[in-house]
Amino acid sequence: MKGSMLACVVSLWLAGCGALEPHGAAQSITLDGSPNGLAVRSADGAIFVTDDVANAIVVSRDAARFAPYVTIPDGGAARNSLSQIATGADGNLFVMRFGFGTASAIFRVDASGGVSLASGIHPERRRLGLVVLNDGKELLSSWFVKQGEGGVSLVTGDTERDLVTGLGKPVGIAVSDDTLYITDQTNNRIVKVDLQAALSASAPVAATDVFATVPAPDLLAASPDGALYTKCGEHGLCRISKTGENKTLATDFDEPRGVAIDAARKRLLAVDRARGAGRPSRLRIIPLD
């Protein structure tokens, strides 16, 4: 069962091969609202971004303009915040509501735009990172209750089992070659966990294996060559190789947030969330070689 659970995760990256490095001219698209999470659907290249102003997802099908896609219920949370988006092999989207300690949840958005609750378990957990397993039947969710008390769990409907504990503020998560990578923002690091071992363990495993030291990492994406992409520092976007070497790709972001690899079209996408009034947020697209 464990091997099949990862099949859909791995399949997302099989469209590309070799090392993906920035190449060619970058593209920038203006985004309204307060963008955060980001996902690309590999089948057609559609780009999905969350907007915390409208508590909604917007979509671009031409990498040139965005349109409203769906609104996510706010659950009575004090303010809006949607976290990482993930795509399933069947065309479904999954997105998490952060919840601010009272109303976190995971939602499924089907191919026709219908929104349903995928899981409302433990609404007090502030949820950020998300990975789809087994065509959406199981999900990995990173969460924290307060800084210094966080982890990653396996969510199956209304059942949640903790897999990893001992994290300060886990944000982004990604799976590559049966390894689970987690950005721990409080502790300025990315840790790695043997996912099969964590799934088979009778108790949560401790997050002690530091893969890379990165200042203030955020949401996370993995590429076919095993590299990771995430925020680094206040304004930087970094690539961490499969052996843990850190390379800064850009230092001129207002605030990097969601990041995604579109391996089929050889491009890196990243949300640049504006700080301060009068400055537009942007989606930045960097061609990859």
Image (spheres, grey):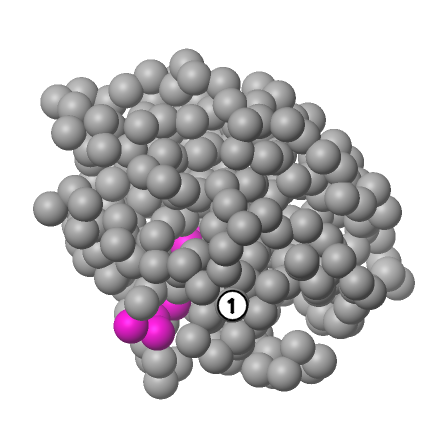
Is residue 237 found inside the magenta-colored segment of the image? no
Percent of width and height locating residue 104: 38, 48
87 versus 249 height, above or below: below
The image shows residue 62, relative to residue 36, as above or below, that is: below
Question: Residue placed farthest to the right in the image?
Answer: 278
User: Is any part of residue 81 visible from this angle?
Assistant: no
Percent coordinates x, y for residue 218 in the rendering: 59, 39
- Viewer-nearest residue: 11 or 88: 11
Q: For residue 92: magenta?
A: yes
Start and end of the magenta stretch? 90-97
Look at 34% across and 59% down and name the residue there. Answer: 11
Identify which amino acid the numbered label 1 is placed on: Ala
Q: From the viewer's perspective, tell me whether residue 233 is left or right of residue 206.
A: right
**Which residue is at a point 66% across and 77% down the rendered structure image?**
63
Q: Position of residue 3 (x, y in %)?
A: 19, 45
SS at badge 1? helix
Instruction: Name which residue lies at 28% across and 20% down.
Output: 205
Task: Look at mark 1 in the image and give the residue it sits on.
Answer: 264
